[in-house]
Image (cartoon, grey):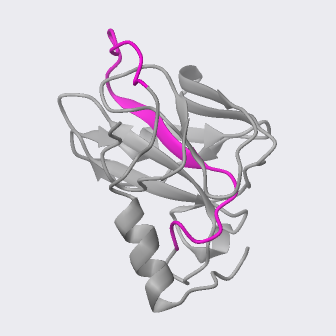
C-alpha cells in the first residue's frame, strides 16, 4: 500500500481530469452482454483514487449492465491466484462498485486479497463455477486505466481513470 501524496490542488486536478478521457474510439457495441462485468482497473495507482484510509490502492471496478439488481455475493473475483468471494451487496442496474486490490482483507469487505501487476495479467469474474468475465490487460503506466467504455466490449488504455463513474470516451 502507498500513502497518497495529497495536496489540495492535486486532489482537485485528479478529480477534474476524471471528466476528460483522451481515449481512442470505443470499439464495437456489446452484444448479448448483460449482468455484472469488469469495467475498469488501475494497476499502478499513485493517487487517482483513494480508499477510506486515504491509501492509493490499485482497484478493479465492476458494473451491473443488466436490467435488474445483481447480488455481488453470488460472484467471486480472482487474478492468476485463487478466487475471492465478493461482499454481500445488491448492485442496482447501471451502478458500479470499486474494489481495492491491495492484498488487505482486514481493511474491509471492499478490499481484495490480491494486488494487480502493472506489467499486466488477467482478472477473472466468476459466478459459481462459470466464468462471467475475463480481462487480460497489458502493461499500464502509473495512473493509467484499462477500461471498457460504456456500451462496448473492447477494452482500451486511458490516461484519465473514472473510478465509480460511467466510462465515457
Q: Quadrant of the N terminus?
A: bottom right
- Which residue ends up furthest to the bottom in the rendered image? 7
Give the residue at x 47% y 48%.
61
Question: Which residue is pictured at 29% across the width and 31% down the height?
Answer: 65
Tell me where residue 71 appears, x and y as whole percent. Answer: 34, 43
Q: Quadrant of residue 156?
A: top right
Magenta run includes residue 83? no
Q: Find out whether residue 45 is within the magenta segment.
A: yes
Q: How many marks?
A: 0
Q: Is residue 128 above or below residue 53?
A: above
17 or 35: nearer the viewer: 17
Residue 67 position, x and y percent, is 18, 28
Q: Tell which residue pokes out farthest to the top in this image.
A: 31
- What residue is at 55 percent from the left and 19 percent from the top? 130
Q: Is residue 69 left or right of residue 114?
A: left
Quadrant containing the C terminus in the rendered view:
top left
As displayed, is residue 23 above or below residue 20?
above
Relative to 19, say whether 71 is above or below: above
Q: Residue furthest front?
A: 22
- Nearer-the-camera pick, 102 or 56: 56
Task: Answer left or right for 42 relative to 93.
Answer: right
**Residue 28 x %, y %:** 38, 12
Q: Is residue 88 left or right of residue 65?
A: right
Q: Relative to 105, is 154 on the left or the right?
A: left
Magenta: predominant secondary structure element?
loop
Query: Farthest residue toward the left?
Result: 67
| Residue in the foreground of this view, choosing between 34 and 152 | 152
Highlighted magenta segment, given as a residue range? 25-50
Amino acid at each position: 500500500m502507498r500513502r497518497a501524496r495529497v495536496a489540495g490542488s492535486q486532489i482537485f486536478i485528479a478529480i477534474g481530469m476524471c471528466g476528460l478521457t483522451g481515449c481512442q474510439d470505443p470499439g464495437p457495441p456489446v452484444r448479448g452482454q448483460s449482468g455484472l462485468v469488469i469495467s475498469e482497473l488501475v494497476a499502478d495507482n499513485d493517487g487517482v483514487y483513494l480508499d477510506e484510509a486515504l491509501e492509493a490502492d490499485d482497484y478493479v471496478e465492476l458494473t451491473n449492465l443488466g436490467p435488474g439488481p445483481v447480488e455481488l455475493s453470488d460472484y467471486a473475483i480472482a487474478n492468476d491466484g485463487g478466487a475471492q468471494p465478493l461482499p454481500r451487496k445488491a448492485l442496482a442496474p447501471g451502478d458500479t462498485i470499486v474494489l481495492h486490490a491491495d492484498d488487505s482483507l482486514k481493511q474491509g469487505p471492499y478490499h481484495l486479497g490480491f494486488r494487480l501487476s502493472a506489467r499486466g495479467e488477467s482478472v477473472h469474474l466468476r459466478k459459481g463455477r462459470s466464468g462471467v468475465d475475463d480481462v487480460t490487460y497489458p502493461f499500464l503506466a502509473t495512473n493509467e486505466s484499462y477500461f471498457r467504455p460504456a456500451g462496448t466490449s473492447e477494452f482500451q488504455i486511458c490516461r484519465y481513470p473514472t473510478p465509480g463513474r460511467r466510462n465515457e470516451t
